Image (cartoon, rainbow, N blue to C red):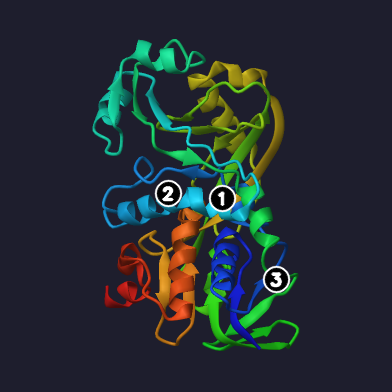
């Protein structure tokens, strides 16, 4: 008998369980594979509350900003280096049309000429037409983050969950695990328990070598995330293909081609890894945070921003489980909004 059982051992489930345990709750995480083996393993770790926002998602910005504000204390409390780096984001236009579109984007603090962009990042392509800068955004290494979180809570790996109720979990092996509350945080697999979540495929390339940039570089078609360890992440595709996680030659070619267009030095880096993962998308692509009608607590549907939203999601769910008020920024993301719609 636990105070709370978390179904799903990615960054969201582990962070929620950790923060709940810090409030004195006895918790357990159940993971169908290994901790962090899903979307968290493939994620680039971009922490961009302003520049990654899609049109029409106004409530998302306050939630995402709150989460980024929480990040320094969040990673400090873990006590290990998880690669948190407030490196900033530089969005780059490679021709006049892209520049016109980029100038209209919200979230950037200043517009830079082509020469100003190259002064900041000498490795940029000579065809750079201009850019926009946000110096406050950051990145983190999701794989190191997940490892640090998994070391702080009880995780049962290789446990397939067949069904959930407000206060119990039944596994595929027939075991019943009882708890004060059950939290569904199974990412793209949350649909098995009735959550309105679909898988959205993303393919990512990892390179290694001398960093071609010191900031997150973004164009219309690609992002490039440098890490101080020498890793460079190039991503990511956006594909509605169900639960397919096949890495395709076409996607890898497209990512490397578009990355090379903006940072030619990428061609000299070592190819380390190519992976595909499944983001959990809700009907409106916003997260599902809170209790649904049957009493099961949802922490899923984070789409492209699970790593960014991990701290604020953990704060929200831990507060709910402890009987405290969650942060007000989470209110627009109650599961009940979809029923009302």
Callout in the foreground (1, 2): 1
Q: Nearer the viewer, residue 255 or 149?
A: 149
- Distance, label 1 to label 2, CA atoms, is 13 Å
Taking the image as shown, residue 177 lies to the left or right of residue 107, namely: right
Q: Earlier in the sequence, mark 1 or mark 2?
A: 2
Residue designated by label 2: 68
Badge 1: how crowded within 10 Å, few (<14), some, or many (20+)?
Answer: few
Residue 52 percent across, percent down from the top left: 38, 43
Residue 304 seen in this snapshot: no
Residue 31 percent across, percent down from the top left: 68, 69
The residue depicted at 52 percent of the width and 25 percent of the height is 214
The answer to whether mark 1 and mark 3 are in CB contact below 8 A is no
Badge 2: how crowded within 10 Å, few (<14), some, or many (20+)?
Answer: many
- Which corner quadrant of the image does residue 129 belong to? top left
Residue 103 seen in this snapshot: yes
Q: Which mark is residue 76?
A: 1
Height in image: 73 above or below 196? above
- Which corner quadrant of the image does residue 169 belong to? bottom right
Callout in the foreground (1, 3): 1
Q: Earlier in the sequence, mark 3 or mark 2?
A: 2
The residue depicted at 59 percent of the width and 72 percent of the height is 21
The answer to whether mark 1 and mark 2 are in CB contact below 8 A is no
The residue depicted at 31 percent of the width and 66 percent of the height is 328
Badge 3: how crowded within 10 Å, few (<14), some, or many (20+)?
Answer: some
Q: Secondary structure at mark 1?
A: helix
Q: Secondary structure at mark 3?
A: loop
Height in image: 98 above or below 292? above
Q: Quadrant where the N terminus lies?
A: bottom right
Q: Quadrant where the C terminus lies?
A: bottom left
- Distance, label 3 to label 2, CA atoms, is 26 Å
Residue designated by label 3: 154
């Amino acid at each position: 008998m636990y105070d709370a059982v978390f179904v799903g051992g990615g960054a969201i489930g582990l962070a929620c369980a950790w923060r709940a345990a810090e409030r004195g709750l006895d918790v357990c995480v159940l993971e169908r594979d290994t901790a962090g083996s899903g979307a968290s393993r493939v994620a680039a770790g971009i922490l961009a509350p302003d520049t990654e926002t899609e049109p029409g998602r106004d409530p998302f910005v306050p939630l995402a900003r709150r989460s980024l504000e929480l990040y320094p204390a969040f990673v400090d409390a873990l006590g290990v280096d998880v690669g948190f780096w407030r490196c900033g984001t530089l969005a780059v236009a490679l021709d006049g049309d892209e520049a016109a579109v980029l100038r209209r984007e919200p979230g950037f603090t200043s517009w830079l000429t082509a020469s100003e962009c190259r002064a900041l990042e000498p490795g940029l392509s000579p065809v750079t037409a201009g850019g926009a800068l946000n110096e406050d955004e950051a990145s983190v290494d999701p794989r190191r983050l997940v490892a640090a979180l998994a070391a702080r809570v009880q995780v049962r790996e290789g446990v397939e969950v067949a069904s959930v109720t407000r206060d119990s979990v039944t596994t595929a092996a027939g075991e019943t695990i009882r708890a004060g509350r059950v939290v569904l945080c199974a990412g793209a697999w949350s649909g098995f328990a009735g959550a309105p979540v679909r898988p959205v495929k993303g393919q990512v390339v990892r390179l290694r070598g001398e960093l071609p940039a010191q900031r997150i570089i973004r164009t219309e078609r690609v992002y490039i995330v440098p890490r101080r360890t020498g890793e460079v992440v190039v991503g990511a595709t956006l594909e509605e293909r169900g639960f397919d996680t096949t890495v395709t030659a076409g996607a890898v070619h497209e990512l490397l081609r578009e990355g090379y267009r903006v940072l030619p030095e990428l061609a000299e880096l070592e190819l380390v890894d190519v992976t595909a993962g499944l983001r959990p998308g809700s009907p409106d692509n916003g997260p599902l945070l809170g209790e649904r009608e049957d009493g099961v607590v949802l922490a899923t549907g984070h789409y492209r921003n699970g790593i960014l939203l991990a701290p604020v999601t953990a704060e929200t769910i831990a507060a709910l489980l402890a009987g405290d008020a969650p942060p007000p920024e989470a209110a627009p993301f109650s599961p009940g909004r979809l029923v009302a719609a």
